[in-house]
C-alpha cells in the first residue's frame, strides 16, 4: 500500500494552524478593564487604604483569563499556595553518622544505682549449678572482648544498668558444662540454639562466649549471618577450588580485626608450627599467632591471612587452645545466598568460603586439636525461611526427647514439597539442639530483684509481683519480661 | 574522587548498578549480569571498585550496543517502518500512538516520543 500523501510533511493540520496563525488581538489585550481600576474609584470617605481594598485574587484570575484559553486539567494546583521551603535546620549529619548512632552500644548508665551484692564472673562460675538463678556481672576485660567480637546488640538493654550483668539460667549451665566436657575430651560440641522470639538466644551465645573468654578459649564469632549472604560485602572466586568457592575479603578483614582484639592474649601465647611464606611478611615457625593476625591490614591479603590463622589453630600440636566458633542468625547461611556467580547462577551459601568453614565445623567434618564448640543460634528477626533447617532441628529435638520418653514421634519430610536442601540436611544431621523458652519463677525473681536494686523497676519484688510479670511475659520469656517491666520506663 | 566508565565520569558514592543503568540501552537485567560477571556485589559503590575492574567494565561496555548505537537502532527500525509505508511508521511520523490507543486525550507520551528521529 502506498501512502496517500507525503509522509515527511505529515503534521496535524489543526496544530500547525494554531502554531502559525498570529494570536488574536483580543487575547493579548484584556477584554474588560481590570478590577483594580474599579477599586481605585473608591468612596471618598473610606478610611481603608487603597492597597488593602484591591482584590488581588480576582485580578490574577483576570490575567490568567487574558492569556487565552487554559485547559482545566493543566493548571491543577492543590490547596492554593505552594508549601514554603523548610527553614535551615543546621548541619545535617555526616554520612554514616545516623547509622552509627542507631547501632551504638552503651554498656553502662551512671544514673543507675550500683547493686552492692553484684559480683564479677570468674572462670568456673557459668558452669557451676550453684549459680543458677543468680545475676552476675561481666568483668571489664570480658566486656571489651565481647564488644570487640560484637556480641552485644543494640536492642538489648545493657544501657539501663550501671554494669552489664547476666542471669545464669539452667540452660546456660547446661551449655557451658557440655562445652567443658567437650574440651576436656578434645571433642567438638556441635549445637544449635533455637527458640521463640526474645527468649534469649543471642544472649545464650553471649554467655557461651563469656565462658570461653574467661577460660582462655579462642573465640571466633560471626555476629550477623545476614552480612555474609545478603550480597552486601565484596566477594571474589578462590583459585584452585572445585566447585568454585568465594572468599569475602572485606568481611574477612573485619573478622580478623575482631579476632585479634578479642583474643590477643591467647593468640600471643600460641605459636605457629609451620613456616608461612605466603603471608605479606613471611613468618618462621614458632612465632606467635598474634603476629599472623597483626598482618591483617589490607583487604587483598585478608583471606590468605585468615586461612593461615585458621590452619594454625587447627594444626595438631600441643598447647593449642580450645576454640569456640559461633554464628548468630543461622537461617541466613542455610539457604542459597543473594550472590551470583560469573555465569549468573545463584551461589549457595555453603560455597562462600567463610560460611563453608562454619558449616563444615557444625557438620562435624573438622576436628579441633584441643576440642571446642561450634554454636549456631537461630534468629526470629528478619530471618528467611529455611524448610530444611526447620525440619532438621525439629527432628533432632524429637530424637533427643526420644531418649527420655520413647513414644515421641520424629517428624518426617513432606514427600510433596520440593523446597528442601540436601546440603543443609547433611550439615544438620548430627547436631544437638538447645531449645530456649521462658525462665522459671526463681530465675525470674532473681532478675526482677536485680532490676529493682538497680532502680529500674519501681515496685516491691514479692511473690505477687513476680507472678504477675512472669505471667505477663508469656511464662517467663525474658524479652517480654523486659517489655513488661523495664521498657515501660523508656521515655 | 570520580571514576570514568565508558567516557562518563561518575561520583564515587554512586552505585555501580545505577551507573551502568544510566547508559541508554542497558537495563536492570543486563547490568545485573555484568555485575555478576565481574564479581561485583549489587551494593558496590563506584569508589570501592579497583581500577582494573573499571577498565574491564569499560571494555565490556564498548562491545555492547548501547548509547548512540542503541538509539540509532531504534531510529533505523522506525525509519524502516516508515519507508515501507506501514501504518506504524506513519503513526510514528505523525507523532501519534502506534498501537491502537485512543487519541482523544492522554497521548502526551506519544507526542513526546513518537517521531521518525526518535531521541529517547
Image: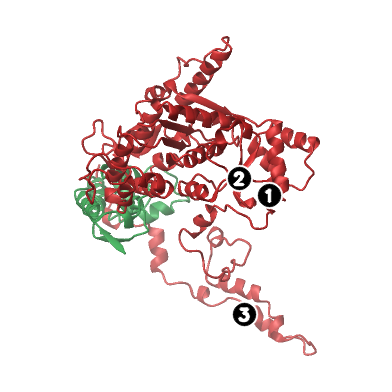
Chain colours: A red, B green
Query: What's the chain of the residue with tag 1?
Result: A
Q: Position of residue A301 (x, y in %)?
A: 27, 49
Q: CA distance from mark 2 to mark 1?
A: 10 Å
Badge 3: residue crowd in 10 Å (few <14, some 14–19, many ≥20)? few
Write the residue at 68% across / 42% down: A483
Residue farthest toward the bottom in the current orientation of the protein: A44
Q: Which residue is mark 2?
A: A165
Closer-to-camera residue (A432/A484): A432
Q: Which residue is mark 3?
A: A33
In the depicted structure, whether residue A424 falls above or below residue A118: above
Residue A115 tag number = 1
Q: Which of the 4 image quarters holds residue A459?
A: top right
Upstream in sequence: badge 2 or badge 1:
1
Write the residue at 47% across / 63% down: A94
In the depicted structure, whether residue A163 falls above or below residue A174: below
Q: Position of residue A142 (x, y in %)?
A: 51, 47
Q: Which of the 4 image quarters holds residue A78?
A: bottom right
Q: Are marks 1 and 3 on the same chain?
A: yes
Badge 1: residue crowd in 10 Å (few <14, some 14–19, many ≥20)? some
Query: What's the chain of the residue with tag 2?
Result: A
Amino acid at each position: 500500500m502506498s501512502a496517500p500523501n507525503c509522509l515527511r510533511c505529515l503534521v496535524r493540520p489543526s496544530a500547525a494552524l494554531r502554531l502559525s496563525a498570529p494570536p488574536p488581538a483580543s487575547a493579548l489585550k484584556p477584554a474588560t478593564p481590570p478590577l483594580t481600576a474599579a477599586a481605585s474609584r473608591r468612596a471618598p470617605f473610606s478610611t481603608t487604604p487603597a492597597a488593602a481594598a484591591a482584590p488581588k485574587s480576582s485580578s490574577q484570575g483576570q490575567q490568567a483569563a487574558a492569556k487565552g484559553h487554559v485547559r482545566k486539567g493543566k493548571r491543577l494546583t492543590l490547596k492554593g499556595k505552594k508549601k514554603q521551603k523548610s527553614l535551615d535546620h543546621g548541619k545535617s549529619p555526616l554520612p554514616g553518622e545516623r547509622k552509627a548512632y542507631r547501632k551504638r552500644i552503651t554498656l553502662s548508665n551512671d544514673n543507675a544505682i550500683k547493686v552492692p551484692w553484684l559480683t564479677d564472673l570468674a572462670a568456673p562460675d557459668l558452669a557451676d549449678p550453684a549459680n543458677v538463678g543468680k545475676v552476675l556481672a561481666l568483668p571489664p576485660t570480658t566486656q571489651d572482648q565481647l564488644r570487640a567480637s560484637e556480641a552485644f546488640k543494640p536492642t538489648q538493654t545493657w544501657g539501663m544498668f550501671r554494669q552489664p550483668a547476666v542471669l545464669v539460667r539452667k540452660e546456660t549451665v547446661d551449655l557451658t558444662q557440655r562445652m567443658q566436657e567437650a574440651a576436656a575430651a578434645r571433642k567438638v560440641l556441635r549445637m544449635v540454639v533455637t527458640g521463640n522470639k526474645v527468649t534469649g538466644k543471642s544472649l545464650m551465645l553471649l554467655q557461651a562466649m563469656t565462658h570461653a573468654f574467661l577460660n582462655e578459649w579462642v573465640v571466633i564469632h560471626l555476629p550477623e549471618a545476614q552480612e555474609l549472604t545478603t550480597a552486601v560485602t565484596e566477594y571474589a572466586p578462590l583459585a584452585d577450588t572445585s566447585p568454585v568457592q568465594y572468599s569475602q575479603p572485606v568481611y574477612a578483614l573485619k573478622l580478623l580485626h575482631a579476632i585479634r582484639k578479642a583474643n590477643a592474649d591467647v593468640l600471643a601465647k600460641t605459636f605457629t608450627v609451620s613456616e608461612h611464606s605466603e603471608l605479606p611478611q613471611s613468618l618462621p615457625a614458632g612465632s606467635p599467632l598474634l603476629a599472623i593476625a597483626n598482618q591483617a591490614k589490607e583487604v587483598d591479603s585478608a583471606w590468605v591471612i585468615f586461612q593461615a590463622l585458621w590452619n594454625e589453630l587447627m594444626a595438631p600440636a600441643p598447647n593449642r587452645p580450645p576454640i569456640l566458633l559461633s554464628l548468630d542468625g543461622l537461617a541466613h547461611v542455610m539457604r542459597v545466598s543473594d550472590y551470583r556467580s560469573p555465569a549468573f547462577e545463584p551461589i549457595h551459601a555453603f560455597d562462600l568460603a567463610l560460611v563453608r568453614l562454619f558449616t563444615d565445623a557444625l557438620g562435624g567434618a573438622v576436628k579441633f586439636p584441643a576440642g571446642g564448640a561450634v554454636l549456631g543460634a537461630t534468629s526470629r528477626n528478619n530471618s528467611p525461611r529455611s524448610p530444611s533447617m526447620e525440619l532438621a532441628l525439629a527432628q533432632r529435638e524429637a530424637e533427643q526427647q526420644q531418649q527420655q520418653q520413647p513414644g515421641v514421634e520424629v517428624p518426617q519430610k513432606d514427600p510433596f514439597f520440593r523446597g528442601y536442601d540436601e546440603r543443609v540436611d547433611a550439615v544438620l544431621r548430627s547436631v544437638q539442639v538447645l531449645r530456649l523458652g521462658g525462665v522459671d519463677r526463681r530465675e525470674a525473681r532473681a532478675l526482677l530483684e536485680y532490676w529493682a536494686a538497680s532502680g529500674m523497676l519501681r515496685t516491691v519484688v514479692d511473690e505477687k509481683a513476680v507472678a504477675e510479670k512472669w505471667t505477663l511475659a508469656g511464662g517467663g520469656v525474658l524479652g517480654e519480661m523486659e517489655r513488661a517491666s523495664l521498657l515501660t520506663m523508656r521515655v | 574522587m570520580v571514576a570514568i566508565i565508558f567516557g562518563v565520569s561518575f561520583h564515587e558514592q554512586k552505585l555501580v548498578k545505577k551507573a551502568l543503568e544510566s547508559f541508554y540501552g542497558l537495563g536492570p537485567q543486563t547490568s545485573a549480569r555484568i555485575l555478576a560477571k565481574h564479581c561485583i556485589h549489587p551494593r558496590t559503590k563506584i569508589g570501592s571498585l579497583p581500577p582494573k575492574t573499571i577498565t574491564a567494565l569499560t571494555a565490556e561496555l564498548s562491545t555492547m550496543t548501547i548509547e548512540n548505537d542503541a538509539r540509532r537502532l531504534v531510529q533505523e527500525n522506525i525509519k524502516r517502518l516508515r519507508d515501507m509505508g506501514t501504518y506504524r511508521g506513519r503513526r510514528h511520523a505523525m507523532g501519534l500512538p502506534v498501537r491502537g490507543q485512543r487519541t482523544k486525550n492522554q497521548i502526551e507520551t506519544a507526542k513526546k516520543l513518537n517521531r521518525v528521529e526518535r531521541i529517547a
